[in-house]
């Protein structure tokens, strides 16, 4: 089973994903967590330290390549192992980011989405942008503007697949988000309880 956690930065996807993996494994459902990073944070920090600012199109191409490779590896894990694979981010994240940057989706991302197995469930972590902004600032690993987070959320909601996403209220604790996910999974026939 492939579960994808999607949402803007600061929505709590990573924390909830790790907790969900732990809770599923404890309940005798072997689970693996994959982060699917894009390298954006590292590339931005590297460029800032060296005062190098490559064009947005180049950065996006590098980021998209890294994300695609990581998503492919995660899908490979899902096909070679048993249990649940929980993916923090997916190609949906990259499509939304490209829209925020006024870049076309291109042909590769949509093709890859079409070729790869469709995730069994995509949970969208819905959070107010001011809460997400506070969370991003508190971890002091990167920075995002409220305007970017707002545009990112809107871009997600405009994705063709968004109507199939299950919306999770991510404004509360990660534990509450995981309880809500487990409840949804139980309703999907896994028999799980929060």
Image (cartoon, rainbow, N blue to C red):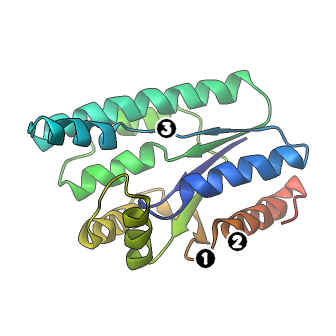
- The residue that disc 2 covers is 176
Residue 86 location, x and y as percent?
A: 65, 44
Residue drawn at 75 percent across, 25 percent down: 81
Residue 168 in the image: x percent, y percent?
61, 70
Residue 180 placement: quadrant = bottom right
Label 2 Cα crowd, 10 Å radius (few <14 / some 14-19 / many 20+): some
Q: In front: 178, or 190?
A: 178
Q: Quadrant of the N terminus?
A: top right
Judging from the image, what secondary structure is the residue with disc 1 in? loop
Classify mark 3: residues with Cα within 10 Å, few (<14), some (14-19) or many (20+).
Answer: many
> Which is nearer the N-term, disc 3 or disc 1?
3
State which quadrant residue 38 falls in. Answer: top left
**Residue located beneath label 3 in the image:** 36
Cα distance between the residues tagged 2 and 1: 6 Å
For residue 180, which numbered disc appears in the image? Answer: none
Residue 172's disc number: 1
| Residue at the spot 31% in from the left edge and 38% down from the top edge | 42
Real-space CA distance between mark 3 and mark 2, rounded to the nearest whole angstrom: 23 Å
Q: Are marks 3 and 1 in contact (CB under 8 Å)?
A: no
Q: Residue at x 16, y 42 (%)?
A: 48
From this viewpoint, is residue 89 visible? yes
Q: Considering only order in the chain, which callout, 2 or 3, is on the residue closer to the N terminus? A: 3
Position above or below: 97 against 155:
above
């Amino acid at each position: 089973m492939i579960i994808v956690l999607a949402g803007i930065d600061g929505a709590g996807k990573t924390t909830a994903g790790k907790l969900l993996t732990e809770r599923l494994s404890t309940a005798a459902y072997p689970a693996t967590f994959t982060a699917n990073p894009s390298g954006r944070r590292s590339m931005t920090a590297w460029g800032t330290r060296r005062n190098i600012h490559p064009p947005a199109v180049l950065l996006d191409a590098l980021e998209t390549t890294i994300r695609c490779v990581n998503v492919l590896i995660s899908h490979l894990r899902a096909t070679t192992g048993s249990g649940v694979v929980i993916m923090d981010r997916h190609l949906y994240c990259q499509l939304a980011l490209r829209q925020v940057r006024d870049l076309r989706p291109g042909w590769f991302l949509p093709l890859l989405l079409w070729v790869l197995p469709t995730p069994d469930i995509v949970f969208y972590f819905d959070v107010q942008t001011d809460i997400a902004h506070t969370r991003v600032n508190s971890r002091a690993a990167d920075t995002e503007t409220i305007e970017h987070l707002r545009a990112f959320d809107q871009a997600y909601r405009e994705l063709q697949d968004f109507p199939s996403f299950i919306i999770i209220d991510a404004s509360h604790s990660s534990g509450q988000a995981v309880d809500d996910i487990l409840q949804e999974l139980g309703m999907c026939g896994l028999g799980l309880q929060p």
